[in-house]
Image (cartoon, grey):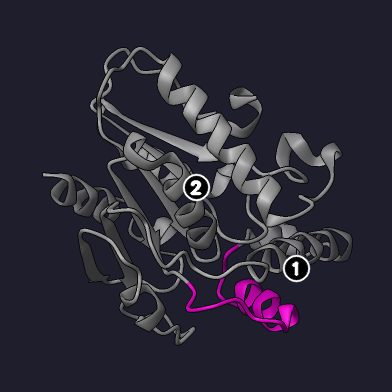
Amino acid sequence: MSRRVLHRWGRLEQVCLTVYCIPHAGAGAAAIEPLAQEARADEDIVGVRLSGRENRFSEGQPRDLESVVTEITEAVRDDATSGGNGNIPRVILGQCSGAIVAAHVAKRLGPLVSGLVVVSPPDKGSADTSVTTTSLLSLGGFDEDLLLSDEMRAMIEEIIEGDVKLTTQSSIPVDLDGIPVLEIRGRFDDTEQSEQPWKEVSTSTRQLEFVDSGHFVVRDAPGTILSLIRCFLK
């Protein structure tokens, strides 16, 4: 299962850190590639690929949040316990709506992970998925060349709406059982998400950082994200 759900940009001989990354609504593992390009030689960046996109397109959209969280949790646990890298730090990262999924996955994995990183996290799910879909497209979260095709644009919009509906099925976990949380937000993010729900999460450590970026920090400031993660884990 892990090979179907998780994507790597090459195998590393020695690993000092693994970051499992859940992309924003509508996106596949390709949205995580900027982090892989900025990573050090011993930093293992792993993109999570949900069904219904990229090489899992034929599987159709995810059914519900529970099945998504279960699938990712099992894939990460299998990957982490079979890689032979011992007790290296492992982090779960989620961007935008992926942050809610990441929080649920981290909670289930418990002591297997060293921290949760939420990037441009939403304050809550929106029942009006069209608003989120329009926002993501206008903010530049997808390749503009793909959006030139009406057929491709409609397909992407459908995937976004499906992903957003998943995150409206559950709130942010209020208790992360002591897992440290690093919250990263773009200083120029125009989506106006509130920090309050994440302040209310019960955890051992919560660190908030603002970086010079818009909403898609993984794309615009991947090196800064990795620097913050390194410092956070010290």
Q: In the rendered image, which quarter is residue 160 located in? A: bottom right
Q: Secondary structure at mark 2?
A: helix
Q: CA distance from mark 1 to mark 2?
A: 21 Å
Q: Residue at x 62, y 41 (%)?
A: 70
The residue indicated by pointer 1 is 161
Q: Residue at x 74, y 45 (%)?
A: 53
- Residue type, mark 1 in image: Glu
The spot of residue 56 in percent (x, y) is 76, 36
Q: Is residue 189 left or right of residue 71?
A: left
The residue indicated by pointer 2 is 105
- The answer to the question of whether label 1 and label 2 lie on touching residues, with beta carbons closer than 8 A, is no
Residues in magenta, as a range = 122-141
Q: In the rendered image, which quarter is residue 146 located in? A: bottom right
Q: In the rendered image, which quarter is residue 150 located in? A: bottom right
Which residue appears farthest toward the right when viewing the image? 151
Q: Crowdedness of circle 1 by 10 Å Cα count: few (<14), some, many (20+)?
A: some
Tell whether position 17 is magenta.
no
The spot of residue 62 in percent (x, y) is 76, 50
